[in-house]
């Protein structure tokens, strides 16, 4: 069954700060000072990295037992390459990440091969990873002038 998730993003008066909200939860986003922001929070692409890591961690925790894995601890290190010159219109390069790399850390009694198979399973179930790996159709449904 298809489920629709909803969110809003509202530009705040200070610098490049944006308040996002979904289901009553708020997240502040900004940009570093060298990109014109006030550097009070993560920027959106850093949040993308965090969202991917969080989704993988949730999948690990949610499915470990059913996959026969005793998982005592789990975290993900992530890094992505992005050239800000694209976003700023200074160079004809891609605006977004060109590559995202991640390393899963598992505290488990499983062997390396079993942990690798579980990592494959996590990747196969992670919705954020799926969005990034396969792309998502973006549809502007309107422009409202107020």
Image (tube, rainbow, N blue to C red):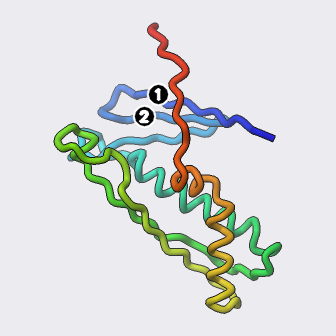
Residue 5, given in percent of the width and then of the height, sits at 67, 36
What residue do we see at 63% from left, 83% from top? 107
For marks 1 and 2, give the CA distance: 5 Å
Q: Residue at x 36, y 48 (%)?
A: 96
Name above or below for residue 84 compared with residue 58. above
Q: Toward which corner of the image does residue 126 lie, by quadrant?
A: bottom right
Vertical order, 115 against 40 (above or below): below
User: Tag 1's secondary structure?
Assistant: strand
Q: Residues within 10 Å of mark 2 (few under 14, many from 20)?
A: many
The residue at 52%/47% (across/down) is: 135
Nearer the N terminus, badge 1 or badge 2? 1
Quarter of the image with the N terminus is top right
Q: In which quarter of the image is residue 75?
A: bottom right
Element assignment for label 2: strand
Nearest the viewer among 12 and 8 is 8
Quarter residue 120 falls in: bottom right
Q: Which residue bears the numbered disc 1?
A: 10
Q: Is residue 34 left or right of residue 1?
A: left
Q: Position of residue 54 (x, y in %)?
A: 58, 59
Q: Say which residue label 2 marks.
A: 18
The image shows residue 96, relative to residue 57, as above or below, that is above
User: Pointer 1: residues within 10 angstroms few (<14), some, or many (20+)?
Assistant: few
Please give the name of the residue rendered at 68% of the width and 86% of the height, measured from the top-left corner: 114
Residue at the extreme top = 146
Answer with left or right where residue 63 lies relative to residue 131: right
The answer to which of 51 and 116 lies nearer the viewer is 116
Q: Which numbered marker is on residue 50?
A: none
Q: How many labels does the image show?
A: 2
Disc 1 + disc 2, Cβ < 8 Å: yes
- Give residue 34's position: percent from left, percent from top: 21, 46
Relative to 144, 99 lies left or right: left
């Amino acid at each position: 069954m298809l489920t629709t998730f909803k969110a809003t993003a509202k530009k705040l008066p200070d610098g490049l700060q944006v308040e996002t909200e979904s289901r009553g939860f708020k997240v502040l986003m900004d940009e570093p000072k060298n990109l014109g922001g006030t550097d009070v929070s993560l920027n959106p692409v850093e949040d993308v990295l965090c969202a991917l890591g969080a989704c993988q961690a949730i999948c690990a925790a949610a499915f470990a037992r059913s996959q026969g894995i005793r998982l005592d601890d789990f975290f993900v290190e992530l890094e992505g390459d992005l050239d800000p010159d694209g976003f700023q219109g200074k160079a004809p390069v891609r605006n977004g990440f060109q590559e995202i790399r991640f390393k899963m850390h598992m505290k488990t009694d499983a062997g390396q091969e079993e942990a690798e198979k579980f990592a494959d399973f996590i990747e196969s179930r992670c919705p954020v990873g799926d969005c990034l790996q396969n792309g998502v159709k973006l549809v502007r449904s309107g422009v409202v002038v107020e």
